[in-house]
Amino acid sequence: RTGGWVLAKGSPEAILKLLKKDSIPSNYEKRAENLANEGMRVLALAYKRIETEQKVREALMSRSEAESGLTFGGLVAFTCRVRKDTRDVIGNLREGGHKVAMVTGDALLTGLHVA
């Protein structure tokens, strides 16, 4: 048995740059945007088959080689619900004179939905 697989996951924007053009669905960006607008956390999945042991060694030596020419595998969307008491807690903090800010590693549209 020779060869192997490269599997990648990341933000739709980051993975898009790594995909073979002919594997990108026509609604890729719009679908990812719609899911984020609904408050979902969205990950894109991609893959490619590496046929030979030599190509596996090359992929192991160079991340850019491994992550080029990937095939779109799908979008994964999931939710992390905001706690039910969040609104009350933020209100209490503001009443107490505290400034409240939201810091997130989520996509901008997901963060806006949560806010």
Image (spheres, rainbow, N blue to C red):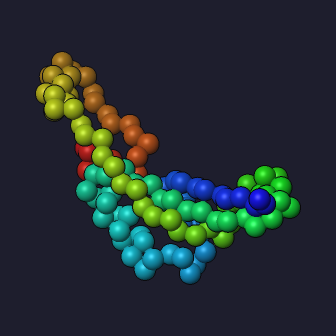
Tell how many labels. Answer: 0
Q: Residue at x 73, y 64 (%)?
A: 50
Residue 87: x, y in percent?
16, 32
Q: Does 22 sit left or right of 42 as displayed?
A: right
Q: Is residue 76 left or right of residue 70?
A: left
* Residue projecting furthest to the right: 54
Please tell me in which quadrant of the rendered image residue 104 appears. Answer: top left
> 52 or 30, which is in the foreground?
52
The residue drawn where x is 41% and y is 70% is: 29
Q: Is residue 99 left or right of residue 68?
A: left
x, y percent for residue 63:
73, 55
> For the view shown, which residue lies furthest in the top direction?
96
Q: Is residue 51 above or below residue 91?
A: below
Q: Nearer the viewer, residue 28 or 60?
A: 60
Pinpoint residue 56: horizontal percent, then vertical percent.
79, 58
Say which of 77 and 33 sits in front. 77
- Residue 103: x and y in percent read 38, 37
Quadrant showing the C terminus: top left
Q: Residue at x 83, y 59 (%)?
A: 53
Q: Say if 19 sits above or below 96 in the image.
A: below
Picture quadrant where residue 88 is located = top left
Q: Is residue 108 visible?
A: no
Where, quadrant-wise, is the N terminus in this rendering? bottom right
Choose between 84 and 47: the one closer to the eye: 47
Identify which residue is drawn at 76% across, 67% down.
Answer: 51
| Res 78 visible | yes
